[in-house]
Amino acid sequence: CNSYCSYCIIPYVRGRESSRSIDDVVREVTELEKNGIKEVVISGINLGSYRYGVENLLETLLEKTGKCRFRLSSLRPSGITNDIIKLLKNTRVCPHLHISLQSGSDRILKLMNRHDYSGDDFVRITEKINHGLSGRMPFIAADVIAGFPGESDADFNETVKVLGSSRINRLHVFAFSPRPGTRAFDMRLCDSSTVNRRKKVLLEFSDRVYSGSVRNMNGRDVEVLWEADGRGITENYFEAITDGTFKPAINTVSRCRVTGINYEKMQIVCSLIN
């Protein structure tokens, strides 16, 4: 990674960015398909800076491979382009994005050395995704760090405001953890009680929006890739279970209708569409 975020050790231990050729990726995916793989996740330390363009890679994979579906791993807000949103309309590309927001406070983003987007940019991007993919029920998750050094109550409240104004489905929340050798290691830390309180607020927010998203799936049609006996993952990244009327084979994809919710585990319950 070439970004050198002030909290991150990756550039120091993994070195500079490198990108596999598109042809190399196509060859691997072709081989995976021959071996029965139904879903491929396109991943990288900093996927948005892929040398040959994530959009070009996806377009080529869709053209030169068969039926497997593709899912993108984490992207910075600035890496989600109009072309990527357009490609997510293709039924072989999962309408699921994981965005590395980290903070909604522009001041904290600058301290993190993340200068390529703002909190308002994140809100606009989530709106654009939901508008552009309204027919596909997109799922948006985001990473947020609680208690970054120097984060004031005002900064944290700005993050909460940004999240509340955005259209997301879930958060991945991390308490700041200092890494020796990074710039943030020598910054003034927030006290642990403040960090834990802020983390709790963010986790409670995530639980609310996620439970609402799960409930909103009731009655909708989905495609489920069955990964274990009676459990699978939809194209928009909800955990699914069968309603007990059918037994799907592992590593098969079924068109299903959501007929209920398992509220204890926040799973969608699916019946098979014949």
Image: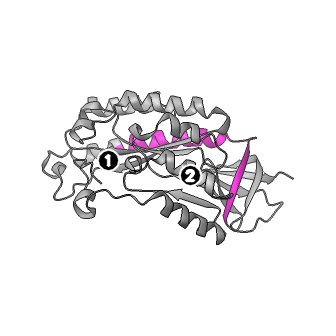
- Extent of the magenta region: 199-227
- Relative to the observer, which residue lies in front, 187 or 212? 187
| Residue behind mark 2 | 60
Per the image, label 1 sits on a secondary structure element best described as helix
Q: Is residue 111 depicted above or below 161 in this figure?
A: below
* Residues at marks 2 and 1, CA–CA distance in whole angstroms: 45 Å
Residue 265 visible, this angle? no
* Dot 1 alpha-carbon crowd within 10 angstroms: few under 14, some 14 to 19, many 20 or more: some
The residue positioned 44% from the left and 59% from the top of the image is 21
Closer to the camera, 58 or 12?
Answer: 58
x and y percentages locating residue 85 in the rendered image: 54, 37
Q: Is residue 32 above or below residue 142?
A: below
Classify residue 49 as left or right of residue 241.
Answer: left
* Element carrying mark 2: helix
**Mark 2 is on which residue type?**
Thr
In this view, the residue in front, 240 or 27, is 27
Question: According to the image, label 1 marks what residue?
Answer: 196
Residue 204 location (% of width, % of height) = 46, 42
Q: Return the x and y of residue 254 as percentages of the image width and height.
A: 76, 56
- Is residue 46 found left or right of 34 in the rendered image? left
User: Which color scheme does this rendered protein use?
Assistant: one colour
Q: Nearer the viewer, mark 2 or mark 1?
A: 2
* Quadrant in the picture for the N terminus: bottom left
N-term mark: 2 or 1: 2
Residue 153 placement (x, y as % from top left): 26, 32
The residue sitting at 77% across, 52% down in the picture is 255
Q: Residue at x 67, y 55 (%)?
A: 240
> In this orientation, does residue 102 appear?
yes
- Give the residue type that dot 1 points to: Asn
* Disc 2 packing (10 Å; few <14; some 14–19; many ≥20): some
Residue reaching furthest to the bottom: 35
